[in-house]
Image (cartoon, rainbow, N blue to C red):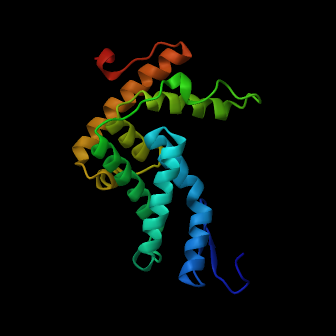
Amino acid sequence: MVSDDAAVLDDARARVVTTGTAAERFTAFARDRSPELSRIAYLLCGDTHRAADLVQLALERTYRAWGRVGDGDPFAYARKIIATARIDSWRRTRKDVLVSPTDLRPGATPDGTQHVVDRDELVRALRQLPAAQRRVVVLRYLLDRTEKQTAEDLGISVGAVKSGASRGLDRLRDVLGAEVGTPSTSRKEAQ
């Protein structure tokens, strides 16, 4: 727990502990931000076990670099590690074992919460995108990164981010429109 004399800043996403030892600050960071890092990793790779490995790697590297990044934005550092490690793992093996969208998660949740159902549909649709487009769409739109930030995180040009995002969103519109049963209009069809 945080002691009474520790300065705690309330953020919309997480608490940032600004006093205490480096190990205590890192522990607070890892505890508060691991769920978000896990969600990012899962959306990038689509596999729960690989996502856990990516988060573990990100936390390990963030801890080793804590002296440099602890006072800045350690979440951005860890997020970049996850994206880079995912790309590196794909490059090493040059294969990506894709899971059928029907095998990702079971059907609708028992409580019928629309938010959960929508998220499930989105994850299934994201799995149908090529890996490069999925990375761009996840970073750009689900994490609200700018085009420049997304390009820096992925090590690609801003133009590649724009085209990847455009193509990815068109594909998502097609997939989600087909799943919902409503006709979708991509930019190509509209012109």
Left or right: where 37 falls relative to 140: right
**Residue at 44% of width from left, 43% of height from top?**
44
The quadrant of the image that shows the N terminus is bottom right
**Residue at 61% of width from left, 60% of height from top?**
12
Residue 77, image x and y in percent? Answer: 41, 64
Q: Nearer the viewer, residue 91 or 28?
A: 91
Left or right: where 106 falls relative to 80: right
The quadrant of the image that shows the C terminus is top left
Q: Is residue 85 visible?
A: yes
Which residue is situated farthest in the right direction here? 111
Residue 84, image x and y in percent? Answer: 34, 53
Quarter occupied by residue 131: top left
Quarter occupied by residue 140: top left
Left or right: where 41 falls relative to 108: left
Residue 30, image x and y in percent? Answer: 57, 65
Residue 172, image x and y in percent? Answer: 43, 27
**Residue at 53% of width from left, 50% of height from top?**
52
Quarter occupied by residue 67: bottom left
Number of marks drawn: 0
